[in-house]
């Protein structure tokens, strides 16, 4: 299976600004998931969006999904220093439960 | 969501030795997986741990190098055999409860360094 791509690879913004990360994938999917990883630790699950959904919200997070373009975006509003982390999208590899991960975006929030 | 305990959290090992990583979940789960994250890279699936039978390995990973056990619905182990410096990575287990539409949750990972 091939991994998706995320852009940008790195993003540095000021605290309080919004951060947008994009993810593209190659196969048909049932769902797409976004994760956060702090400094080489375990992954924290953020949001799962199903293929029949176009947008989903969770607190300061907003995820969109465009299956016609095979792409998704993660928006973090009113960013905080604690949001500094790597963010990964992952798809279900054509419907199987195993995940295919994007390369990730390293987000740095400057105080 | 399930609480996933992964042990050890980190280890430094000598070349040629083997290490077994444990993944314990506090409730029964449908699926368990093992992933590898090489330094500065994304995650790659090693195998699906099947309860009571042999694991299903992804291309590039073999049972002799990464033997996996899953004796029940809450526990799995991954062994990294005959280690070399190239095996220095973070190894993570993940679980799914219920059907395919459910989120996949990860343990905190095992950071492995080979000297």
Image (cartoon, coloured by chain):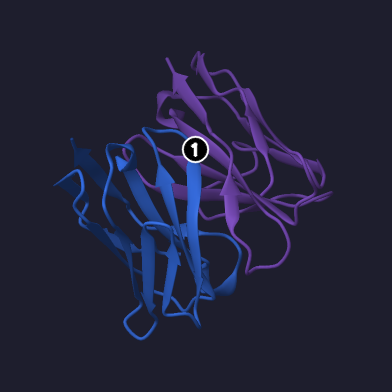
Chain colours: A blue, B purple
Q: Position of residue A72 (x, y in %)?
A: 35, 70
User: For the point 38% across and 67% down, which residue is it?
Assistant: A63
Please, what secondary structure does the residue beneath circle 1 have? loop
How far across and down, in percent of the image, does residue A41 sit?
45, 33
Quarter of the figure with residue A22: bottom left
Q: Which chain does the numbered disc 1 sit on?
A: A
Relative to A19, does residue B74 appear above or below in the rendering? above
Figure disc tally: 1
Point out residue A98 in the picture as x, y percentages from the top left corner.
Answer: 57, 60
Which residue is under mark 1? A42
Report the side of A58 relative to B53 (left or right).
left
Q: Is residue B44 left or right of residue B79?
A: left
* Residue at (49% x, 17% y) in the render: B15
- At a point 58% along the width and 38% down the height, the residue shown is B107
Give coordinates of residue A30: x percent, y percent.
54, 76
Tell me which corner region of the image, top left, top right, bottom left or bottom right, holds residue A58: bottom left
- A55 or A37, which lies in front? A55
**Category of crowding for the residue at label 1, using alpha-carbon neighbours closer than 10 angstroms: few (below 14), some (14–19), many (at least 20):** many
Direction from residue A57 to residue B6 in the image, left or right? right
Pick the residue in front: B103 or A57.
A57
Q: Residue at x 32, y 51 (%)?
A: A104
Quarter of the rendering occupied by the C terminus of chain B: top left
């Amino acid at each position: 299976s091939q991994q998706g791509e995320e852009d940008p690879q790195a993003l540095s913004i000021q605290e309080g600004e919004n951060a947008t990360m994009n993810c593209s994938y190659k196969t048909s999917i049932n769902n797409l998931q976004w994760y956060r990883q702090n400094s080489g630790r375990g992954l924290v699950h953020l949001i799962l969006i199903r293929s029949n959904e176009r947008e989903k919200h969770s607190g300061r997070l907003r995820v969109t999904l465009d299956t016609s373009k095979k792409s998704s975006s993660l928006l973090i509003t009113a960013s905080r220093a604690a949001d500094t982390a790597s963010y990964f999208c992952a798809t279900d590899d054509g419907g199987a439960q195993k995940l295919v991960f994007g390369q990730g975006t390293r987000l740095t929030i400057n105080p | 969501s399930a609480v996933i305990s992964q042990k050890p959290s980190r280890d430094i090992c000598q070349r040629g030795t083997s290490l077994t990583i444990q993944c314990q979940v506090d409730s029964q789960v449908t699926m368990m997986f093992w992933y590898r994250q090489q330094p500065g890279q994304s995650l790659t699936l090693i195998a699906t741990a099947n309860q009571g039978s042999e694991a299903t390995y992804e291309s590039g990973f073999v049972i002799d190098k990464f033997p996996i056990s899953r004796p029940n619905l809450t526990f799995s182990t991954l062994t990294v055999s005959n280690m070399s410096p190239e095996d220095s990575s973070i190894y993570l287990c993940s679980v799914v409860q219920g059907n395919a539409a459910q989120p996949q949750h990860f343990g905190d990972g095992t950071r492995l360094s080979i000297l």
